[in-house]
Amino acid sequence: MVRNWGCVFLSEISVENQGSPLRKSSHMLMNFVPRLHLVETLVLQGEGWGLALSFGHPYDVERLQMLVLIIHQDLTGLCSNHLVSFQQIIRVQSPDGVKRITATKRETAATFLKKVAKEFGFQNNGFSVYINRNKTGEITASSNKSLNLLKIKHGDLLFLFPSSLAGPSSEMETSTPPGFKAFGAPNVVEDEIDQYLSKQDGKIYRSRDPQLCRHGPLGKCVHCVPLEPFDEDYLNHLEPPVKHMSFHAYIRKLTGGADKGKFVALENISCKIKSGCEGHLPWPNGICTKCQPSAITLNRQKYRHVDNIMFENHTVADRFLDFWRKTGNQHFGYLYGRYTEHKDIPLGIRAEVAAIYEPPQIGTQNSLELLEDPKADVVDEIAAKLGLRKVGWIFTDLVSEDTRKGTVRYSRNKDTYFLSSEECITAGDFQNKHPNICRLSPDGHFGSKFVTAVATGGPDNQVHFEGYQVSNQCMALVRDECLLPCKDAPELGYAKESSSEQYVPDVFYKDIDKFGNEITQLARPLPVEYLIIDITTTFPKDPVYTFSISQNPFPIENRDVLGETQDFHSLATYLSQNTSSVFLDTISDFHLLLFLVTNEVMPLQDSISLLLEAVRTRNEELAQTWKKSEQWATIEQLCSTVGVQLPGLHEYGAIGGSTHATTAAMWACQHCTFMNQPGTGHCEMCSLPRT
């Protein structure tokens, strides 16, 4: 047995037996302490070390020579150049975890860094290694400095940062809740509502119970001590009961307790084979436990990212439902609004809907088909300047039951389904496209706050709005293309089977058999109830109006099938019918603003920022400033060419001249709508005659 392997040069070895020495030059261990009964002690003789061996049998020189020769051969491979040369293990910590690198004390820093790069899969200049956690004591790729000179010893822990994380500010020192790997969290900026809720106390404070509490007004007991936001008894006793705690309450639960969530991490589920496994051929010719994704057992998600959906007013929903009322066809729209605090649930989040954008689509009584929307990016940009964002999607599933009474069929219930498998897959796809930014996840995102709203019949045969989300497990199955709908059973989904093109992990769910026993079933098929999270949908008692409401509103986009088109004639009609003296109230219409930006005749995308800021901040002075711009003057002139006189046109004409002089000076081409100078008989743009 050998302990503390280390080597020194020995001038000689003295092996003694009954006073007869045997000398032989060799390399020996510095601390050779075997537990054999033959070795008695370790002594120092002259300039070298000597082993005193004690035999229990007569003197045998050949046996001594054999023993020394074996020791010499064993040590020759370990010792070189008469210098200390230990085999040591250096730990290197990175955002991906800790790995162990084998090195020697005589090894140069450049050689050691090459080993680190190979172990972590970096390029030679794609990372930096530091001795200290606060990014001090950087190890440079020097061929003149050894690890011994850098004072790096066996078992030391070094810190690796990729080039994107390297710098003077340490990502490890950011303030993150206990239990999460701060060095593994990307440098992401969370939503404002998440930043706000993460700073809140979140506890449920209770007043002193006069019957149960037996202490003074300043004391606390089990009957009045504040509750944690994830307390299940409290949530179950709310009216109505809350089945899912809020996401931030779930985070508090993970990071609470004695260990403060030391071993907790918000990791996204993956159903794909891990890449980079070189121990075998790629799928379908090989797979191993390292690269194989784990099987998934579907469970009811205990938390939800959004706890409430609230439409600001009934007008927003009624205008959306008008399409179904006039055609009988189903309809689709995107919800634009903002995320705010939902105070009815501890640390809850509410999605407030301010407007509904209706993209190009083909709707029938039983189906919906979404078409490519070339204006999608522009709509998101305009909404962002208005302080809004896309928070969800909505669709109708309405069938008229009695037209005289105005009732609709109650079709979505516990006996049928709440969301079909196709709708779950669509919701999962939308949620994957709009992930929830989370600094506590190594990927920088976890789950989604994108909601699903359904306008359908309720138990009273009236139109009801129901809100849903799908679980993170469903998002993973949809993202990795592992979930399929059933054609003839909308309440069932189907987990794909593995093929030569794709490996699909096994998906299970738990059920109760006829004997009352809990059994595990393979998800082929799969009840979609395991994937759905319900969200309450409400309207406020006191309506809120981000945009103004008019008796004659501007037409909604992509409703040509109803004969409602967005053009300058409809704009002129809208402006002539809205005689409000406040210009901001007239122009504060979401669909009107989109038309001003996306129309093909005179798009105002580059010059409408001031107006959008005025609408966002409800600033009438900014709106009046924009009204005096050349762009709005041109819009008014284009409206006047369609034969509708605008009530406010003469007001602007008073600034730059009379209305009559202005209209007489310029004329609009009937073919391309270009404004031409007076006295010309042909259009300067298209060269066509004036009449």
Image (cartoon, rainbow, N blue to C red):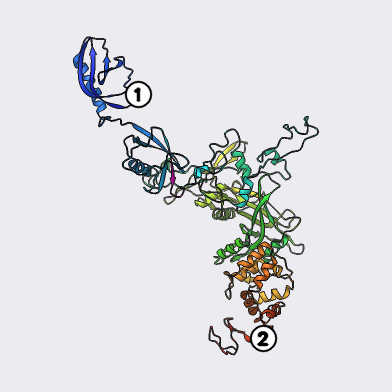
Q: Helix or strand or loop: what does disc 2 sit on?
A: helix
Would you identify the image quadrant in which residue 72 lies? top left
Position of residue 673 in the picture relative to residue 169 (left or right): right
Q: Position of residue 432 (x, y in %)?
A: 54, 53
- Residue pushed farthest left? 62
Tell me if residue 229 comes above or below residue 464 in the rendering.
above
Which image quadrant is residue 634 in? bottom right
Q: Is residue 281 left or right of residue 57?
A: right
Measured Cα–Cα span from mark 1 to mark 2: 106 Å
Which amino acid type is shown beneath numbered disc 1?
Answer: Arg
Residue 25 rendering spot, x and y as whole percentages: 21, 23
Q: Secondary structure at mark 1?
A: loop
Res. 43 in view = yes
Identify the residue at horizontal 77%, vertical 30% (top origin).
Answer: 215
- Decide whether the magenta segment is chiefly helix, strand or loop: strand
In-front residue for pair 158/190: 158
Residue at (36% x, 47% y) in the render: 124
Residue corresponding to mark 1: 3
Identify the residue shown where x is 62% and y is 55%. 452
Quarter of the image where one finds residue 200: top right
Q: Earlier in the sequence, mark 1 or mark 2?
A: 1
The front one of 280 and 193 is 193
Q: Which mark is residue 661?
A: 2
Q: Is residue 480 above or below residue 511?
A: below
State the image coordinates of residue 297 (x, y, percent, origin top left): 54, 42
What kind of residue is marked 2?
Ala
Is disc 2 surrounded by few (<14), some (14 to 19) or many (20+) residues within 10 Å? few
Write the start and end of the magenta stretch as one range: 158-165
Q: Residue 630 versus residue 410: which sits nearer the camera?
A: 630
